[in-house]
Amino acid sequence: MTELETRLVGQAEAIHERIFPCAARKEFAQCFTMDRGKLCFWYNTEDQSTHLLVADIGQVEERMPN
């Protein structure tokens, strides 16, 4: 997983403590989509609710060293 993906997983764990891959996915790495410059992380919680965290890809890329 990328640094940004790892950060989003960490944020989700900080919010919900226990998280799980969304739907039939087996790994968190399979729970990401990209849309219009945003990275979306889909995950489930113990109550089977689906949640979404979104990060702006452009801001992270601008801060990355060349």
Image: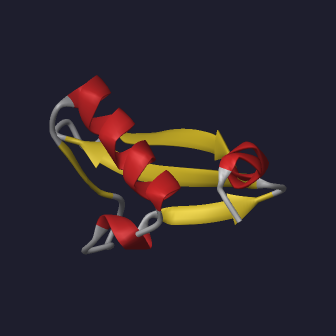
Residue situated furthest top in the rendering: 15
Residue situated furthest right in the rendering: 36
Lateral position of residue 66 relative to residue 53, left or right: right
Residue at x 80% of width, y 55% of height: 37
Residue at x 31% of width, y 47% of height: 44
Q: How many marks?
A: 0
Residue 53 on image: x %, y %: 52, 39
Quadrant including the C terminus: bottom right
Residue at x 59% of width, y 52% of height: 40
How does the figure colour the protein chain or chains?
Answer: secondary structure
Residue 8 on image: x %, y %: 44, 45
Residue at x 51% of width, y 53% of height: 4
Residue 38 on image: x %, y %: 72, 51
Quadrant including the N terminus: bottom left
Residue 27 on image: x %, y %: 27, 71
Lateral position of residue 64 relative to residue 48, left or right: right
Quarter of image, res 59: top right
Q: Nearer the viewer, residue 47 or 56?
A: 56
Quarter of image, res 11: top left
Eyeballing the image, is 3 above or below 47?
below
